[in-house]
Image (cartoon, rainbow, N blue to C red):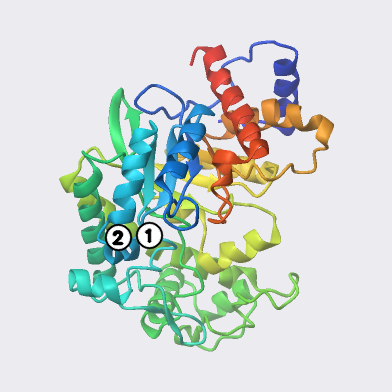
């Protein structure tokens, strides 16, 4: 697919302002919900903060307002600890309230590939003790995704969730070949943040590097030449070494050894994707129409410093979402050319993308230009580089403002309306 330069985005925006109908070329085919509407979602965690946490009437009012402004789906974290803690009460409530408002739910069943599954409550519920991974200080945290226990526990929880909500709940269904198919995400913030430094995983890493280099007729000298290191033996590769694997980002960028970090991050991303692929395939045996989403907090190739640090520490690389049919991508501002290309690469690889914007940001646009920004720039950008639209505020305390803050509601409504009109105008 031909890359679309920023100038074309500006040109499309100006054409829309002038009242011309944009051509179908340059826009992605949209994901559609059962009603035929293009997918528009809002991040929602009603059980986490007041007033949504405790007031059904307030939630109902806010969700009705969210539906009226053009959204048709809620993107929610529905992890196992909350489900077990209150015997599904919070999630039962959210499904009922969403259904009453005419909204569906795309649930994320875990955070960062394992923050909840190694919890003692999960072990007690399923009699599966998921081992914890290790950080660089040998502290136990998150889950060891390479373990059979991780895969078994996630499969059990996903099965329980689907059996409970697939027919009676409000699980999102997307049209695929004209057929509505349910969608879940095995993980939000898909990644393996700050862990994978246990002895077993480290041994797997250096053995994989050894096999790769020896299969190519190379040796440890070739590795040292490529990495810029002086490692005496493959078995001496140590991801805890901060001079070779600078995950703390202490060294200056021009002194950091990017190649070993890159190979280690790709290895870690593959481990996560392999584990989630196993769970996906197991679930497809029972639910053959199921579609799978993944969610990432920054676009791939995002130049923001916090995104770069997260990328390496969480192994947030495109290969980590290969198990998914669609990917929710939270933006961190306007999209650079590299970010645009990364989104198109995802689409070309067979995945579909939902681009999710923080409507609390104006990205440097002055007050006079905001109508153009929200009514033309954001919806056009979204249609050109993704298949669906989303809005987020990851701060649960502020999320309820999507339903009641006039400015936020107005921004989201302007974007959603214009986004829908793009496909209406093209007849798509």
Residue at 63% in and 15% down: 22
Residue 94 coordinates in the image, percent (x, y): 36, 46
Residue 159 located left or right of residue 102: left
Q: Position of residue 164 (x, y in %)?
A: 21, 48
For marks 2 and 1, give the CA distance: 12 Å
Count the marks: how many?
2
Displayed quadrant of residue 8? top right
Mark 2 vs mark 1, foreground winner is 2
The residue positioned 61% from the left and 80% from the top of the image is 244
As displayed, is residue 197 above or below residue 328?
Answer: below
Please name the residue that numbered disc 2 is placed on: 83
The quadrant holding residue 208 is bottom left
Assess disc 2: are there few (<14), some (14-19) or many (≥20) residues with their C-alpha within 10 Å of its C-alpha. Answer: some
- Which residue in the structure is indicated by mark 1? 110
Quarter of the image containing the N terminus? Answer: top right
- Residue 127, can we see it? yes
From the top left corner, tell me how far across and down residue 5 is, in percent: 70, 32
């Amino acid at each position: 697919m031909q890359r679309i330069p920023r100038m074309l985005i500006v040109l499309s925006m100006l054409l829309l302002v002038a009242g011309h109908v944009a051509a179908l070329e340059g826009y992605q085919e949209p994901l559609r919900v059962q009603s035929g509407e293009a997918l528009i979602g809002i991040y929602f965690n009603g059980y986490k903060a007041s007033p949504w946490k405790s007031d059904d009437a307030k939630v109902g009012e806010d969700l009705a307002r969210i539906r009226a402004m053009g959204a048709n789906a809620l993107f929610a974290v529905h992890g196992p600890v909350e489900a077990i803690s209150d015997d599904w009460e919070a999630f039962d409530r959210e499904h009922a309230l969403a259904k009453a408002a005419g909204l569906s739910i795309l649930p994320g069943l875990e955070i960062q590939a394992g923050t909840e599954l190694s919890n003692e409550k999960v072990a007690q519920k399923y009699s599966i003790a998921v081992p914890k991974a290790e950080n660089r200080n040998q502290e136990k945290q998150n889950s060891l995704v390479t373990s059979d226990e991780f895969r078994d526990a996630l499969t059990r929880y996903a099965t329980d969730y689907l059996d409970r909500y697939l027919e009676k709940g409000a699980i999102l269904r997307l049209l695929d070949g004209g057929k509505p198919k349910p969608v879940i995400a095995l993980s939000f913030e898909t990644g393996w943040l700050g862990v994978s430094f246990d002895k077993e995983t480290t041994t797997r890493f250096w053995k994989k590097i050894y096999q790769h280099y020896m299969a190519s007729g190379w040796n440890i000298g070739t590795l040292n030449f490529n990495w810029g290191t002086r490692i005496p033996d493959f078995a001496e590769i140590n991801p805890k070494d901060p001079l070779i694997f600078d995950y703390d980002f202490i060294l200056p960028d021009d002194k950091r050894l990017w190649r070993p970090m890159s190979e280690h991050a790709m290895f870690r991303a593959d481990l996560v994707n392999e584990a989630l692929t196993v769970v996906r395939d197991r679930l497809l045996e029972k639910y053959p129409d199921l579609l799978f989403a993944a969610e990432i907090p920054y676009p791939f190739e995002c130049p923001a410093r916090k995104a770069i640090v997260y990328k390496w520490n969480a192994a947030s690389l495109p290969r980590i979402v290969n198990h998914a049919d669609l990917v929710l991508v939270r933006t961190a501002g306007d999209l650079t050319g590299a970010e645009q290309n990364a989104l198109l690469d995802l689409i070309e690889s067979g995945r579909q993308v939902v681009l999710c914007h923080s409507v609390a940001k104006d990205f440097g646009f002055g007050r006079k230009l905001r109508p153009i920004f929200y009514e033309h720039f954001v919806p056009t950008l979204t249609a050109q580089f993704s298949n669906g639209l989303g809005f987020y505020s990851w701060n649960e305390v502020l999320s309820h403002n999507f339903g009641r803050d006039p400015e936020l509601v107005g921004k989201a409504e302007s974007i959603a309306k214009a986004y829908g009109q793009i496909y209406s105008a093209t007849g798509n």
